[in-house]
Every structure is written in C-alpha cells, then in structure tokens.
Amino acid sequence: MIKLRGITKAFGRNAVLKGIDLTVEKGEVVAILGPSGSGKTTLLRCINYLEKPSAGEISIGEFRVQCKKPAKKDIQALRRKTAMVFQQYNLFRHKTALENVMEGLIVVQRLPKQEARKRSVELLEKVGLGDKLDAYPSHLSGGQQQRVGIARALALNPEVILFDEPTSALDPELVGEVLAVIRKIAKEGITMIIVTHEMGFAQDVASHIVFMEGGAVVEEGPPRALFQSPKEERTRQFLARFT
Ligand code: ADP
C-alpha cells in the first residue's frame, strides 16, 4: 500500500539516505530501528515531504509522486494522506487540547465546527484525555501532550501515521502511557511507521522491523526472525546492546 523506491537524500555532501526501498502493507505496523544518525528520522520526514528527497518515488495506494519533480498539488496530496507524531509533540501552545485536535479537522478537512468538536472529543477520550479537553499544553505532562499529538494525527484520518521517536522526549515513567495508546490504535488496523528506540515495544507491536544503518536498510523482516536470528552481523551487534 505504501511503496518507497530509491529514496535518496543528501544534506550538502552528507549522503543521508542512499536509495531506500520499503513496502508497507495496509494495516501493517513497521518499526524502524538503527543507531543514531542512520537516517531513520530523515526517511520518515521524506515520506510526507517535511524533507524533500533528492530522488526516488513514493506511492500511497494508487497515488504516486516522483520526488525529483513533484507537482505542488502532489505534495499537498501526500501530506493529506499522512500524519506525523513528533518527538517534541509540536502542539500549538496557545490552543487547548481540544482546539489542537480540532484545528486539522476545520482547516484541512473543512468540517463544520460542531462536527469537528464532536470528533475531537471522541478522539481525546480514546487516548484517555476526556478530562483534559480545555487544558493548555503547558498544563499537561509530556505523556499527555504526546497523547494529544496522537489524537491530532488520528483526526486527520490519514492512510498512515508516521511516529518519529514518540517517547524519546519523555521521562521514563511517562513512556508506558504513550506506548499503551499506540498499541491500542495499532490493534485497530491503522497503518503505522514508527521510528523508535523502544526495543521491547517494537518487538511486540510491529508486524515488520526494518534495521537501518548508514542511510541504508541492512535487514528487514518479522520481529521474531529479526530479534532472535538476525542474518547480518551489524544487526546482531546493534541488538546485542539492548539485551
Ligand atoms: P536518525 O533518525 O537515525 O538518528 P537522522 O535522520 O536524524 O538520523 O540523521 C541522519 C543524518 O542526517 C545525520 O548525520 C544528521 O546529522 C543529518 N541531518 C539530519 N537532518 C539534517 C538537516 N536538517 N541538515 C543537515 N544535516 C541533517
């Protein structure tokens, strides 16, 4: 359902992605693992054009973008099909939890305000924040802010949610509540690509694991195979650090 072909990206002379191919089926949860600096976040950001790939092709369903010469409307279409959950939440500071979730529904999807409100309340209840609708981000914990970020991504009804290290800015005691919410929505069959350092979480939530190093995919496969009998020495060495 999502196909990346030959995704290449350089920052100046630094070749960060060296032709990445990746296929993600509908409803699949893909975890991208790898050492820091291997290009995981850049790859995720290329999928919705927060970074512009230098070359390659991105397809979501029937929709296809040639990264070298994308039309402006193609970039907009790509962004509408994807939603990103950021490491630093990226909420509007001057808007309440409810208003943060409503924003995309009103501005992007052009829903009438009442409808947007109803849907946003439902989503905030789903992430366990039904009692925080009117709270501003500064009055929420990091875990709660990230759950607002997840509700906001769900509100856009995207074909895929891209999670960029969603728990790495959190205090350890707040990680669990955010992972629990991601686990819950994964069970609903929403397609997800998650960059994470949470190995245990990746192992039990992901249906497919991709291990990246140096801007390339070193190895990929089902979690069991990858964690228990990695084929590549580099994968083995990386995973050994977490056991
Ligand atoms: P990871 O997510 O695996 O830690 P990143 O995708 O964040 O890796 O970064 C990969 C490489 O790209 C790193 O060398 C990083 O310094 C570089 N990089 C990332 N973003 C930028 C940027 N905006 N400008 C220049 N270099 C960047």
Image (cartoon, grey):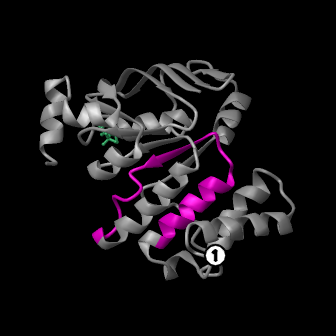
Quarter of image, ligand 1: top left
Quadrant where the N terminus lies?
top right
- Residue under numbered circle 1: 96
Q: Is residue 15 visible?
A: no
The x, y position of residue 130, in whole percent, is: 62, 77
Task: Give the residue displayed 42% in from the left and 68% down from the top.
Answer: 177
- As drawn, 13 above or below 96: above
The x, y position of residue 147, in whole percent, is: 52, 65
Report the amino acid beneath label 1. Thr
160 in the magenta segment: yes
Task: Give the residue displayed 64% in from the left and 78% down from the top.
Answer: 133
Q: Is mark 1 within 8 Å of ligand 1?
A: no
Task: Give the residue displayed 65% in from the left and 34% down from the top.
Answer: 78
207 or 79, nearer to the observer: 207
Give the residues drawn in magenta, as a range: 144-172
Label 1: how many Cα within 10 Å (few below 14, some 14–19, many 20+): many
